[in-house]
Image (cartoon, rainbow, N blue to C red):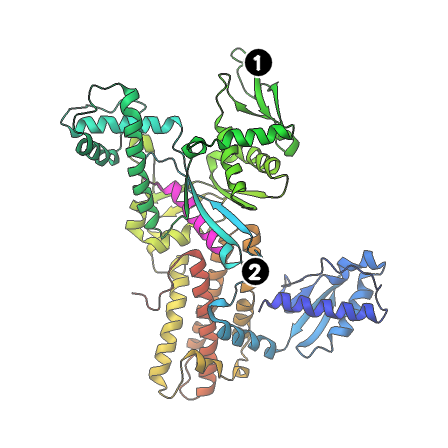
Amino acid sequence: MNVFAHVEGLIIAALEALKADGALPADLDLTGVEADTPRDKAHGDIATNAALVLAKRAKMKPRDIAEKLKERLDSDADIIQADIAGPGFLNLTFRPEFWHGIVATILNEGEAYGRVNVGGGVKTNVEYVSANPTGPMHVGHCRGAVFGDALARLLEFAGYDVTREYYINDAGGQVDVLARSAFLRYREALGEDIGEIPEGLYPGDYLKPVGAALAEEYGEKLLGRDEADWLPLIREKAIEMMMVMIRDDLAALNIKHDVFFSEASLQQNGRDRISEAVDLLKSKGLIFEGVLPKPKGHDDEVWEEREQTLFRSTEFGDDVDRAIAKSDGSYTYFAGDIGYHFDKLERGYKHLINVFGADHIGYIKRMKSAVAALSGGEADLDIKVCQLVKLFRAGQAVKMGKRLGTFVTLRDVVDEVGRDPVRFMMLYRKNDASLDFDFAKVTEQSKDNPVFYVQYAHARSSSVIRNAKEAIGELDTSIEGFRKADLSKLTDPGEIELIKMLAGFPRLVEGAARAHEPHRLAFFLYELASALHGQWARGNDSPHLRFIRDDDVGITSARLALIAATRQVISSGLGVLGVEAPDAMR
């Protein structure tokens, strides 16, 4: 049950009754009426903006509407009191029994608790990682990979039909550089001393296995042949082996894509998605020949005005129109992106999400414009940017550089600290904020390490339930047993506050899914873990608050039911983030 949706339903019903009684206009539009948590807990459990939202429409004072609504809600059996605050906010305080029902709901729904259907089964494409297949994944790719995967999990949890997609950039100049670099390693594998890797090629040792595989497959057949002959063969083999490595790197983080889409396939096998997309835009009058203004900061002496084929992206919110063809008539990289997104739309996706690195911010407006133009506004594109990750070891920043072959790989980080710390910490900052990743801090066992603290809350819950069974043999510690517990015994304010946090889980999932912000879930889990650990600590100071009371089976059973409900929410939340929920920790 979404408690806020439930309360909104109560409020709407009360307003409809006021309309029927003539206390409010019969045609009053009730949209925008919401229930939410008050900023100050002392003001009650849930507040509504109803009076403020409806005042102008009803041509009444907000406080007059609040008074009438208060009178209606005062009679509700679950509400202790309704108080008017400020210009017309209505604050509601609910009876303990109302909150006890949340625990029962969680125990009855189990893993289904918190799932919402805001997505309505809409086909949604989440494209993330999409790193050039020129080497291993580095820690910068790691953040986008984890964010994209967690977002896809979150959207599925919220009722969207999600496809996870990886765009293989296998048609640009960088893969020709890869092929030439692999050719050197091929010659090396055949016994040639290749010396230092020339400037502009990839020097990393990760290409040695590619060279060895090529030597085994072709022997010396490629030596002495023109580049035009060997380049396509080596490029295909190198990309294939790089993608195997990339898939393995992603698997170390428990990340799997449904679709690996080849950029080269846009213009293969008798189809040309780029030309199809351009033709569609032409039919809408959005392609023209023109001259772009000189970019800001460009050297006047080298600037040359020239006519180009342009897309009218400014009609859809972009800063300038964008070139889709070069002076030689070949398509620009942006034209390829237009063709790729056209293909997504042709596959039936109405909701597109791209996860970009910080170096692609400049592409956001043009890509949004392209999707709006191609779909006629029937599909939407959201682009989430993941800012840089800064690594620290022993207080020193760890530098990265793919071309130098000295970068820290994703696998290096996962192998050193484990999958769960990497995933959780990559999500413990909003995606568009820079992230400092400290190898020591993410493995320490303390409250300052969020992933440990949250996982420990789940493990502690399981431990308490196991210990209770040992301490009180007749206690039924099954979920069925907890469902039979007398929850009215949960009267301590700390217990009620913990339940209120659990009650907010469905609303949090809904908001995070709509905003495409999985970090909200990581924050929530840390706060929930803090509340559970805090309640456990209170029992150390006040024995009557201990979770296990061998002198009172009834209250123990009720508290264990609350712990089981909390454990379920933590488990579900960690599952959405792709992090393990352990029953024990070393």
Quadrant occupied by the C terminus: bottom left
Quadrant occupied by the N terminus: bottom right
Q: Are marks 2 and 1 in contact (CB under 8 Å)?
A: no
Please give the residue where the numbered disc 2 appears in the rendered image.
117
Q: Residues within 10 Å of mark 2 (few under 14, many from 20)?
A: some
Q: Position of residue 143 (x, y in %)?
A: 41, 45
Dominant secondary structure of the residues highlighted in magenta in the image: helix
317 or 584, nearer to the observer: 317
Instruction: Say if the magenta span includes residue 420.
Output: no
Where, by quadrant of the figure, is residue 8 drawn? bottom right
The mark found on residue 558 in the picture is: none
Report the side of 427 relative to 181 (left or right): right
Residue at horizontal 53%, vertical 78%?
492
Report the side of 294 relative to 76 (left or right): left
Residue at horizontal 38%, vertical 65%?
456
Q: Position of residue 188 (x, y in %)?
A: 18, 27
Q: Position of residue 233 (x, y in %)?
A: 28, 29
Q: Position of residue 276 (x, y in %)?
A: 53, 31
Q: What whole-number distance in Å separates the C-alpha atoms at marks 2 and 1?
A: 52 Å
Q: Secondary structure at mark 2?
A: loop
Please give the residue where the numbered disc 1 appears in the rendered image.
305
Q: Is residue 284 above or below residue 329?
A: below
29 or 359, nearer to the observer: 29
Q: Is residue 290 above or below residue 264?
A: above
Q: Residues within 10 Å of mark 1 (few under 14, many from 20)?
A: few
Residue 542 visible in the current orientation: no
Q: Is residue 239 above or below residue 502?
A: above
Residue 340 visible in the current orientation: yes
Q: Which residues are magenta?
A: 136-154
> Identity of the amino acid at label 1?
Glu
Sequence-wise, which precedes: disc 2 or disc 1? Answer: 2
